[in-house]
Amino acid sequence: MDRNFGDSLLSGRSPWIQLLVSLFYIFIIGGGLLVILYLPAMVLFEPTDNFLEDLSVVPTVKDVGFLFYLMISQHISVFIIPGFILITKLRKNRNEGYTMFVNPGWPSIKSVVLLTICIFPLLAFSEELIMLIKFPEWLPGLVSWIKEREMLNEKLFNSYFIYKNFLFVILNIIMMLMLPALGEELIFRGVIQPILGRLFRSDYTAIIVTAVIFSALHLEFTGFMQRFIIGALCGLIYLWSGNLWLPAAIHFTNNAFALFAGYAQDLSHTPAPEPGYLIIILGIFMLFMLIPALKILSKFREKYSPVQQAEYQSLDQAH
């Protein structure tokens, strides 16, 4: 290793330093850039006052355009730009390539896409279960906050599908599919998870902790378990393959289902089954679909080997 090069970047430093520097780039640099991008948007779009907080207000075209601008700016400034900078700084030497961006091949991409489809019943089952949770009466503030967040998230999500013109469809594809799949995987799987793996000296602990952080930062209670499962699956696939395009494909596929559901939500008028029956149906379907999912995971595990196990020893030797 080129020691001076590693130290001047991040690879030669302790995991704590790596984590602190990463958080600085994400929240301070990325957040500052987002604020800079946010200010002209207020003048350009002139969004309706409190159009999100007031559930009775129907967003105008400019309101929705403002949301698209804000979400796209967030993905670029907070995730993509800091992600690429940090991955560059975490290289061990000048000559190290970006192996995480190597083309994994169509068979591997097809496998993770099929795997994601197979766990859709598990995701729906987990959402139904978490909705059954009853909070104690002595936590009225928490219950009220969760309800407000759920209503805000629902209105925010529905706002993207009010106007179905071609431009907004393209913006939805960019905002919901392409940018999150790249940006969030850059930060969570490409940066945070490896650092936590070195910090905890356990790849699998890092996967779980990263998935919890990934899900919690979305601030959506009913979708927490869904995002945790997706985050853990992305982390596992990244650990085994060392390739960032594969968890990005999982992320893309999962969000594609949400995008389709958003456009199809007012096309179906079939009443939903009672919660008890729905959980039973989803539970049976989940168990049925977990069989091919586990087979795909097993074959994928045989194809790839963990790529980061030796890093702990090399880190110890470096320090």
Image (spheres, grey):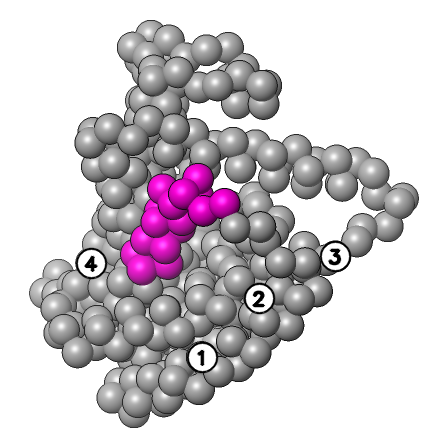
- Identify residue for label 4: 5
Q: Secondary structure at mark 2?
A: helix
Q: CA distance from mark 3 to mark 1?
A: 25 Å
Q: Observer-nearest residue: 310 or 246?
A: 246
Q: Any magenta on residue 101?
A: no
- Identify residue for label 3: 133
Image-based side of 264 in relation to 270, left or right: left
Specify start and end residues of the magenta stretch as a single range.
251-269
Q: Position of residue 238 (x, y in %)?
A: 32, 71
- Identify residue for label 2: 125
Q: Which mark identifies residue 289?
A: 1
Q: CA distance from mark 4 to mark 3?
A: 51 Å
Earlier along the polypeptide chain: callout 2 or callout 3? Answer: 2
Name the amino acid type tagged 3: Ile
**Up-down relation of residue 297 to residue 91 (above or below):** below
Query: Which residue is at 30% across, 84% downward?
Result: 300
Q: CA distance from mark 4 to mark 1?
A: 48 Å
Q: From the image, which quarter does the N terminus lie in? A: bottom left
